[in-house]
Each structure stands twice: as structure tokens, then as C-alpha cells.
Image (cartoon, rainbow, N blue to C red):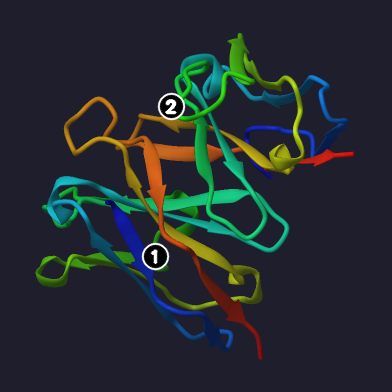
Amino acid sequence: QSVLTQPPSASGTPGQRVTISCSGSSSYIGSNYVYWYQQVPGAAPKLLIYRNNQRPSGVPDRFSGSKSGTSASLAISGLRSEDEADYHCAVWDDRLSGRWVFGGGTKLTVL
Amino acid sequence: QVQLVQSGAEVKKPGASVKVSCKASGYTFTDYYIHWVRQAPGQGLEWMGWINPFNPKSGGTNYAQKFRGRVTMTRDTSISTAYMELSTLRSDDTAVYYCARPLGSSGSATSYLIDYWGQGTLVTVSS
């Protein structure tokens, strides 16, 4: 079981706003930035959000991230069919030479 | 452009070893760490470790606790290729294995931030 907990699934209709949560302990989310990766079926993950709420260039502003205490959230507004994918939260734990810790992933279905 | 091209799918028996390659192009291979991440069928991502291609010895690798003793990450700088070898395979090692490169070069503020991924290599462990 991952130390970062995500709901296994989420869903929404086109145009809706959906949120995906990621919860963890003070040692992980509480002490580090949170990152989000999007993975469409059959493809490698893609960086979606870095350092809690920053978007890489090219990522639409429909995607936003936030963090409070030991929980983080990814929000997607104006949901589109192409947003159907798996979403993974992650933290970079820089203790002991550094390691990535990932959540279990959330499968988003656009109804 | 940055490209990471991995070797093809493998089928292995329990107890065997597998070695996956990751050929890099479009950048200076020794300037960036390489991470390995795996994904079991229907599961989330699982980080396995990283290698510093510039100096893999003397602190140039870091493996996830779960895989220590079973995983070895190496590189051949002459052909800009990183390798991940996993031994004593079990059925629950069946997964897609990805190599990945961070956004920033080693020593930079984003030297850890995975941004480029290989296409993945499916390793199936079955008797």
C-alpha cells in the first residue's frame, strides 16, 4: 500500500469541475512539495503539476493543484473527454539521497 | 529533442533475471540522472531508484528499500544507455518498467523532477 492515498476512481461529465485528493502524513505531503502526473491509457505519464500548484508550459489552466497540511488536491475545471486518464500524485522525499513516492493513482472517467 | 528508447518486451520464468535498456538521445547523457519506475497491471507507479550516469559508483545510485539486493542500475556512456537489472523475479514483478529523465541536470534545482519518459518495457514473469 502506498503512503500517499488517492481514491481509486473519480468521474464527471463534460464541462464539470472535478477534484482528486491525495492524502499522506506529515513526513511526506506535510514536508514536501506535491506533484501530479497524468497518464492516458497506453502511454507514459506526463508531468501536470509541480511544486503543489505550478503548471509546466503547455498544460491548460483548467488544471490546478493545491495543498493544505497533509493533503493535496488536483482540480480539473471544464472537464473534457480527453481528460479521461489516470492521475498520480507524488512527492520527492529528499532524505537519504532522495526518492520518489507515488500515490496509488486515480482513474478519471468522463461520462 | 530528448528521447529515451527502451528495449522490447520480455517474458521470464520465476527466479530468473531481466535486464532492461534505455537509450538516450538529444542531450548529454552524463549530465542527467536516470530514474526507473514500474507499474504493475492496473496499479499505480512505483519508484525503483536512480543512477547518476556521470559517476554511478561512490554514491551514484540510490535504490528503493524494497528492491535493494535485487536491483542493479548501470550505464554505458559510450552508447548513452542506462540499464536496470532485476534478479530473482517473482510473478508480482510483472509490470511495465519505465526509465525517466529529470527536467534539470544534476546539481540543478530540478535535478530530481521527472519530465521525460521512455515508452516502457513490459516484463512478464510466468512459469
Q: Nearer the viewer, residue B43 or B24?
A: B24
Q: Which residue is mark 2?
A: A56
Q: Chain of mark 1?
A: B
Q: Residue A105 — which label?
A: none
Residue A32 spot, x, y in % from top left: 46, 20
Disc 2 on helix, strand or loop? loop
A69 sits to left or right of B70: right
Q: How many marks?
A: 2
Q: Position of residue A13 (x, y in %)?
A: 88, 30
The answer to whether residue A86 is left or right of residue A66 is: right
Q: Are marks 2 and 1 on the same chain?
A: no
Q: Position of residue B57 (x, y in %)?
A: 14, 57
Residue A58 vertical placement versus B5 (above, below) = above
User: In which quadrant will I find the C terminus of chain B?
Assistant: bottom right
Q: Quadrant of residue B53?
A: bottom left
Q: Residues within 10 Å of mark 2 (few under 14, many from 20)?
A: few
Q: Residue at x 64, y 41 (%)?
A: A2
- The residue mark sitting in front, 2 or 1, is 2
In this view of the protein, can residue A71 be seen by the observer? yes
- Circle 1 crowding by C-alpha within 10 Å: few under 14, some 14–19, many from 20: few
Q: Mark 2 belongs to which subunit?
A: A
